[in-house]
């Protein structure tokens, strides 16, 4: 039986509640198409976001970016008390009934309203403590965004569960486009940091509208304690994982301890990290999450699926972050302006952290898809504790020392990725490493070519050299990958064909 998204109350008199099951036919084809749709649309979204970021970074300085990032970090902390992770429980559970959907929706809405009231009460105090009066207005503004995001939890889960990734990707692309246009228009007309604040708000509004339309679902009032109990354990750990991801303790600590100016420099590196991660790992993660959930009772397929997930993620992630590291010294001042030169340690460190993210993402997806959100929660909690400790220890030594310590922390957590795969699916170490060989080789050769070009073309203008580096680097990487992955491409085509005929 294939999963579907539709009005679950078309037959109110039905004696048996309608059950939403995972996709069971054409999963391979849907997964390939899902990655394609996600990559295409998040790629366009990234391009728009990058254009907006370049424009606003020339109009506004680190202080404005730092204040907005600080406010969003506080909202993220408050949002950690909300049950947003129950959407992942809806995706992961084998069968879902209407009572589960209604219960999660109203749980999210009620918690969101409670948190909004708390934000209103705390806004003035935070503004006074931080010395930024505008926080008294920014925090309630972003509080509305929090409620909107929680209202979208169930519609998004239903759309992802049905593997209709084009709607999720369209949500991101359209939301970023509309938000970006409004942000640039406001920045050009002198609205300052409010231009930066408006972009995520508009994105949330557009996202909710698109997801509600795509899900074709309307909440009822079937709240049941039994339904909550069915989802409770996974939902709590998934919410914990979301809390660790969105908590942004790094930004909060830097905002309090180092000030908005240093946070703004840090934010440039983090923003580039988020953009590149979104178009690579972000395009793959929702597909692998639901795919692993759909094969959780088919152990024979799990090792092969995990190897493909590692290969696909690293092939996408490694060249972008490797290229960012190799090009940072020339590209950052040229694109964003020389006033961002002090942000170079953050940019380079996040490039290295982004490379490591190519391994974290498949492991997270595997654990969550197989119903072990608790396992990934423990790993990510330990990483966050180490990140906080590193910032507290090194913030007085400057941004470069902080960024170096964060690279070390993420490197120390890499073995956990293999250990998770070993524990859940008995992944052999040799097969795990084999999946990394091609991406590592191609990225290394690409970076070597990028670094060598300025020495070979000393007479050309810096802009021409940068453009040449990007073209040559991409050509070298694609040439190596395509020439050495014929077998994988054939397997991908075979999987797509099987999916078309039904798994």
Image (cartoon, rainbow, N blue to C red):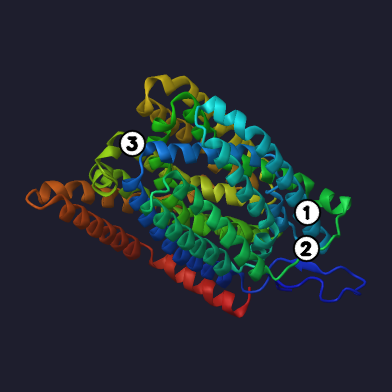
Q: Residues within 10 Å of mark 2 (few under 14, many from 20)?
A: some
Query: What residue is drawn where x is 6% and y is 50%?
Result: 459
Label 3 secondary element: helix
Give the residue number, with chain letter if any, for mark 2: 219
Q: Which residue is mark 3?
A: 343
Q: Position of residue 351 (x, y in %)?
A: 37, 43
> Residue 72, percent across and down?
54, 41
Q: CA distance from mark 2 to mark 1?
A: 8 Å
Name the residue at 49% across, 22% down: 392
Q: Nearer the viewer, residue 365 or 270?
A: 270
Q: Position of residue 249 (x, y in %)?
A: 54, 33
Q: Which residue is mark 1?
A: 106
Residue lying furthest left: 459
Q: Is residue 261 left or right of residue 201?
A: left
C-alpha span from label 3 to label 2: 46 Å
Front position in the image: 50 or 389: 50
Quick check: can you spot residue 295? no
First in sequence, mark 2 or 1: give its number.
1
Q: CA distance from mark 1 to mark 3?
A: 43 Å
Q: Is residue 455 visible?
A: yes
- How far across and down, in percent of the image, does residue 242 sit? 62, 44
The crowd level at tag 1 (other Cα within 10 Å; few <14, some 14-19, many 20+) is: some
């Amino acid at each position: 039986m294939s999963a579907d998204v539709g009005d679950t109350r078309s037959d109110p008199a039905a004696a048996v509640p309608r059950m939403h099951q995972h996709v069971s036919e054409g999963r391979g084809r849907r997964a390939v198409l899902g990655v394609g749709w996600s990559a295409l649309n998040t790629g366009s979204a990234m391009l728009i976001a990058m254009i907006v970021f370049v424009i606003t970074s020339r109009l506004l300085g680190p202080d404005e970016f730092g204040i907005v990032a600080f406010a969003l970090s506080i909202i993220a902390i408050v949002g950690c008390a909300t049950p947003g992770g129950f959407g992942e429980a809806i995706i992961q559970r084998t069968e879902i009934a209407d009572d589960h959907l209604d219960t999660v929706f109203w749980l999210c809405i009620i918690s969101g309203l409670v948190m909004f009231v708390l934000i209103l009460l705390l806004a003035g105090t935070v503004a006074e403590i931080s010395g930024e009066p505008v926080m008294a207005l920014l925090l309630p503004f972003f509080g509305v965004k929090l409620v909107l995001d929680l209202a979208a939890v169930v519609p998004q889960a239903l759309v992802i569960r049905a593997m209709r990734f084009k709607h999720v990707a369209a949500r991101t692309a359209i939301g970023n486009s509309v938000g970006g246009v409004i942000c640039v228009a406001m920045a050009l007309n002198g609205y300052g940091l409010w231009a930066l604040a408006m972009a995520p708000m508009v994105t949330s509004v557009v996202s909710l509208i698109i997801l509600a339309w795509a899900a074709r679902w309307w909440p009822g009032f079937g709240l049941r304690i039994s339904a909550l109990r069915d989802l409770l354990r996974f939902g709590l750990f998934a919410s914990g994982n979301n809390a660790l991801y969105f908590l942004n303790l790094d930004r909060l600590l830097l905002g309090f301890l180092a000030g908005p100016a240093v946070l703004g420099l840090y934010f440039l590196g983090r923003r580039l990290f988020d953009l590149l991660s979104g178009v690579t790992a972000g395009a793959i993660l929702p597909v692998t999450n639901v795919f692993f959930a759909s094969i959780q009772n088919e152990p024979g397929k799990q090792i092969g699926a995990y190897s493909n997930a590692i290969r696909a993620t690293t092939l996408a992630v490694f060249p972008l972050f490797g290229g960012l590291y190799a090009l940072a010294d020339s590209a950052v001042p040229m694109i964003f302006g020389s006033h961002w030169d002090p942000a170079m340690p953050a940019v380079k460190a996040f490039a290295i952290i982004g490379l490591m993210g190519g391994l974290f993402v498949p492991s997270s997806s595997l654990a969550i898809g197989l119903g072990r959100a608790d396992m990934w929660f423990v790993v990510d909690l330990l990483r966050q504790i180490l990140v906080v400790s590193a910032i507290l220890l090194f913030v007085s030594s400057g941004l470069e020392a902080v960024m170096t310590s964060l690279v070390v922390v993420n490197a120390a957590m890499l073995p956990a990725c293999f250990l998770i795969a070993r524990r859940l699916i008995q992944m052999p170490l040799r097969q795990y490493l084999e999946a990394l060989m091609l991406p590592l080789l191609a990225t290394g050769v690409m970076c070597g070519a990028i670094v060598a070009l300025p020495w070979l073309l000393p007479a050309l203008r810096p802009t021409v050299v940068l453009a040449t580096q990007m073209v040559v680097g991409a050509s070298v990487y694609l040439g190596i990958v395509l020439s050495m992955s014929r077998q994988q491409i054939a397997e991908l085509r075979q999987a797509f064909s099987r999916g078309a005929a039904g798994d």
